[in-house]
Image: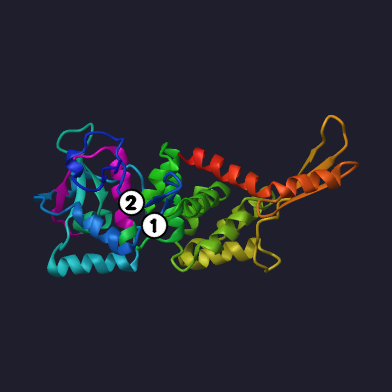
Amino acid sequence: MARKNLLEGLAGMPDESAAPNYPMRGAGRSLVRSLDELAKQAEKFLEGEAVVDLDPDVVEASFVKDRLSEDDEDFQALVEAIRARGQDTPILVRPHGKIDGRYQVVFGHRRLRAARELGRNVRAVVKTMDDRTHVIAQGQENSARADLTFIERALFASRLEELGYDREVISTALAANAASVSKMISVMDRISPEVVQAIGPAPSVGRERWVELSLLAGKASNAADIAKLMDEDSFPQLPSDKRFEALYTGLNKSARPVRKAQVAAAKIKWQPRDKAVQAEMKNDGKAFSFSMKAKNAGRFGEFLSSRLDALYEQFLAEEGKQGD
């Protein structure tokens, strides 16, 4: 049965059980969305809706933050653009759940800040929505603009998980597949939010460099070095990218790329009651080996080999049942 699209007709959502209408594989574990699709989806929030002028003082920030940088060149350019020609695109807000007459931003935080800085009202579309739809809309609008850095997306993913949202919701909000979300959260598990906040968005630093830094920061033996590097007077004065480099270089004394340690292959031994066969299996996640010795090893091996086709078909059948 086709699922209802969360992002269409948000004001009329009956419950939280609906999910976005996107191509799914593996029971919703893989998500592929193009930026064009996301941009169009973000526009649907605002299509055909009345635009109102709100006092910025009655609008609060989202309950989950998605940016590390508040004042940068892009924001100042936005302020000057709005000063010159006005606010072209309205923001999306929802009524505050506890205080009448107040609102909460779903997306458009920087436009709200710009309006506040310019001392003018902010143009907004008001829609009622639950928290789940709020975070999906917020994340997808950011993904459509593609202007959040890797670590800002990772921090957003981590905050959503802390709030109790499952990986499918996080994947939907960030337009990312399960593997990408897992890597984002693993980075945040190893590197503290305080360190991330101190470094900032680091716009020129990609995913793999952050993974390397997180592996260094995750070592207990490096905790003192991290504190020392961040306490240096020059550290806060550096641009965000340079703060990342200073911390990475200070921790990576070998000056070689950091890689996750290889996990030793798990060994499993098996022996039947008559002990006529001794089997050993190794599995490192990428390769699986199976060896046998003792009295019946040769004959039992031939027996297994002759039935590999049937065993594999049985394996596929069992996998199919688990995916249903």
Give yes or no for contact between labels 1 and 2 (Cβ–Cβ under 8 Å). Answer: yes
Mark yes or no: residue 238 visible: no
Q: Tell me: 297 left or right of 166.
A: right
| Residue at 29% from the left image edge and 58% from the top image edge | 38
For residue 147, what is the image quadrant? Answer: bottom left
Q: Tell me: 76 left or right of 321.
A: left
Q: Which color mode does the image show?
A: rainbow
Say which label, 1 or 2, has the lower sequence index: 2
Residue in the foreground of this view, choosing between 24 and 96: 24
Q: Which residue is mark 2?
A: 22
User: Which image quarter is the C terminus in?
Assistant: top left
Q: Which residue is mark 1?
A: 32
Q: Tell me: 87 left or right of 157.
A: left
What is the secondary structure assignment of the residue under circle 2?
loop
Q: Spatial distance from mark 1 to mark 2, Cα to Cα?
A: 8 Å
Residue type indicated by callout 2: Tyr
Residue 92: horizontal and vertical position, in percent? 20, 50
Residue type indicated by callout 1: Val
Please tell me whether residue 228 is drawn above or below residue 84 in the rendered image: above
| Residue at 37% from the left image edge and 49% from the top image edge | 172
User: Which image quarter is the N terminus in?
Assistant: top left
Residue in the foreground of this view, choosing between 324 and 196: 324
Whether 229 is among the magenta residues is no
Residue 121: horizontal and vertical position, in percent? 13, 53
Residue 41: horizontal and vertical position, in percent? 25, 55
What is the secondary structure assignment of the residue under circle 1?
loop
Whether 134 is among the magenta residues is yes
Residue pushed farthest top? 273
Residue pushed farthest right? 295
Q: Which residues are magenta?
A: 118-142
Residue in the foreground of this view, choosing between 313 and 120: 313
Residue in the foreground of this view, choosing between 214 and 47: 47
